[in-house]
Image (cartoon, rainbow, N blue to C red):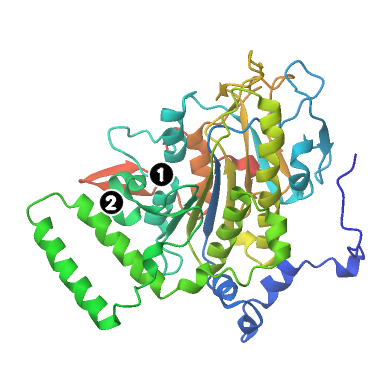
Amino acid sequence: MKPRTNPHACLSPEHGMSRRRVLGVLGGLAGFGSLLNPTVSRALEKKEKQVCLIWLDGGISQYESWHPLPGTRFGGPFRSIPTRTPGIHFCELMEHTARISDKISVIRNMETKDPNHSSGVPRIQRGDPIDRGVVYPYLGSAVSKLLGPADPDLPPYIWIKPGNGGFIHREAGFLGAEHGALALGDGNPPVHIHRPKGISAENDEARNALRKKINERFRSTRGASEIDAYETSYEMAERLMARKEIFDDSELSPKDRDRYGSHPLGRHILRARQLLEAGIRFIKVNSYHWDTHGDNFNMSQRLIPQADRPFAALIEDLEERGMLDNTLVILMSEFGRTPNVNSRIGRDHWPDCWSLALAGCGIKQGAVVGKTSGDGAWVDGTGYDIGDLFHTIFSVLGIDARRERYLYKGQKLAIAHDECKPIREVMA
């Protein structure tokens, strides 16, 4: 079965120049920005590196996604389908991503250490640095510190998640509250970016001045961390009040909404695209309920298309807008699922051999790296730990993790595990 293609697409060689290439050629010309949505043109003009991490909390099954092995003892009931990358197959549940496989890289030989959510999630999102005596930042906060905001008028790190939002300063670890995550609950804009109608701008300014004086007095006799988090959240709110248009959904077409899907993950990845266009440095999109200890195959049949469709749409849209070359997209979990199927027809936690996907920003296109045993249970040869992935991420963002260091209480601390190195096979 071949991946479906657009029956209306022109395949003539003289029409082979993509819109991404056209934008890349024309983006620097005077006046070209006026032809585009203003938020998109700003991102194109600045050419700042950006990141979108799509986090499937709980652990997506590699057998039902990136590494299908039908007909083997662990393969499961789903077919494998060919992709646009010659010789590479994905699970049939990844039909949209199969059509854009030539734009992404897949690593099939991740070999990490922790099989538990409670310790695995922070280890994976912090990169497991070698200096474990301090609380390290999560990846979004690390990028916020190392690169700063892509747009000084916008927060550097936004986390789109189901449930409640707010300012999550603990993501920053020892870096300090200013590098925490502004969380958008259910993808909605923060409620405090709208000034109540009954309060004038003058009164609002006076109230904020009073609040700052009280905070300074409080800070003089108590620890500063909570005050810093509180102040940072207010500063972000002030910046966003002047940029409320980045949350405007009126420009979203019915076609876009359909392409990304009406389920929460689809809506949230579409929101991430808007925020990338606006110039947010780092966006994390969370999806929960991927812990398929029971009924793995039915759950995968329901869940995986919800990631497949908007992930493919995001890659296509970033390329069309000329943004993919400067935007790193990561789709991953804290581990994979066991080869064995348990008594509840589920797959359990498996950090020993699992897969993830990368795209854009210095990532090789159409690459699938890593060998496994014939049944997919074990890495055959070299396996990569999360420190290797962090070195890779930092490298494509232009950060030398061998030389760059955090400075904390007079100590110079590694930003990525010094015993690991970039995964060159996925780097262009």
Q: Position of residue 375 (x, y in %)?
A: 73, 19
| Mark number, residue 176 | 2
Toward which corner of the image does residue 144 lie, by quadrant? bottom left
Question: What type is the residue that disc 2 sits on?
Answer: Gly
Amino acid type, label 1: Tyr
N-terminal-most mark, 2 or 1: 1
For this rendering, which residue is in front, 270 or 146? 270
| Residue 13 in sight from this viewpoint | yes
Query: Could you say where residue 367 lies in the image, as x and y percent from the top left?
Result: 71, 43
Q: Is residue 412 above or below residue 270?
A: above
Q: Is residue 348 above or below residue 133?
A: above
Q: Residue at x 11, y 50 (%)?
A: 222
Viewed as shown, does residue 7 lie left or right of 212? right
Most foreground residue, 165 or 199? 199
Q: Residue tagged by mark 1?
A: 138
Horizontally, residue 246 falls left or right of residue 365, namely left
Residue at (79% x, 24% y) in the render: 77
Secondary-structure class at tag 1: loop
CA gap between label 2 and label 1 equals 12 Å
Q: Residue 341 vs residue 403: left or right?
A: right
**Residue 227's disc number:** none
Query: Is 89 above or below relative to 190?
Result: above
Percent position (x, y) of residue 84?
82, 46
At a point 87% along the width and 69% down the height, the residue shown is 15
Considering every residue shown, the one lying at the far bottom of the view is 31
Q: Are marks 2 and 1 in contact (CB under 8 Å)?
A: no
Crowd class of label 1 (few under 14; some 14 to 19; many from 20; radius 10 Å): many
Q: Quadrant of the N terminus?
A: top right
